Image (cartoon, helix red, strand yellow):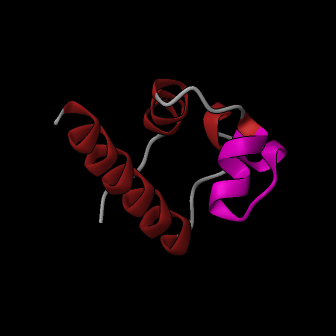
Amino acid sequence: MKNWTSKEIKTLRKKHDLSQPAMGNLLGVSGNYIYLLEKGVKKPSKTLRLLLDCIERQFKENEKERRK
């Protein structure tokens, strides 16, 4: 499991053109919570880090499929 930094969370969100509320919706948290994570005010829990790993993996798989 990756130790997600605020910068990595923001980079993942922006790379896939998601708003903070949309990213929050994917993870089951509020857009405001995503904002706090990106600012470094909050640290992601173990569960949230696992979910971030999962959506990152899914995004990568989707990119591979689009390239075929």
What are the residue bounds of the magenta stretch? 21-36
- Residue under the image location 55 percent in, 65 percent down: 48
Which quarter shows the C terminus? top left
Residue 9: x %, y % from top left: 50, 39
Q: Is residue 52 above or below residue 5?
A: below
Looking at the image, the residue that sits furthest to the front is 68
Relative image position of residue 60 (x, y in whole percent):
28, 45
Decide whether residue 48 is among the magenta residues: no
Residue 49 location, x and y as percent?
46, 63
Main SS, magenta residues: helix
Q: Residue 6, relative to residue 1: is it above or below?
A: above
Q: Residue at the far bottom: name it.
A: 47
Q: Is residue 15 left or right of residue 25?
A: left
Direction left: furthest residue: 68
Camera-side residue of 61 and 49: 61
Give the quadrant of residue 43. bottom right
User: Can residue 14 be seen here?
Assistant: yes
The percent position of residue 50, horizontal first and vertical second, equals 43, 69
Res 65 quadrant in image: top left
Residue 28 lies left or right of residue 11; in this view the side is right
Does the magenta-highlighted stretch encompass residue 25?
Answer: yes
Number of residue marks = 0
Q: Residue at x 29, y 66 (%)?
A: 1
Which residue is found at the position 54% from the left and 31% from the top? 10
In terms of image quadrants, where is residue 31? top right
- Is residue 36 at least partly visible in the picture? no
Tell me which residue sits at (63%, 60%) in the image.
Answer: 27
Q: Is residue 57 left or right of residue 19?
A: left
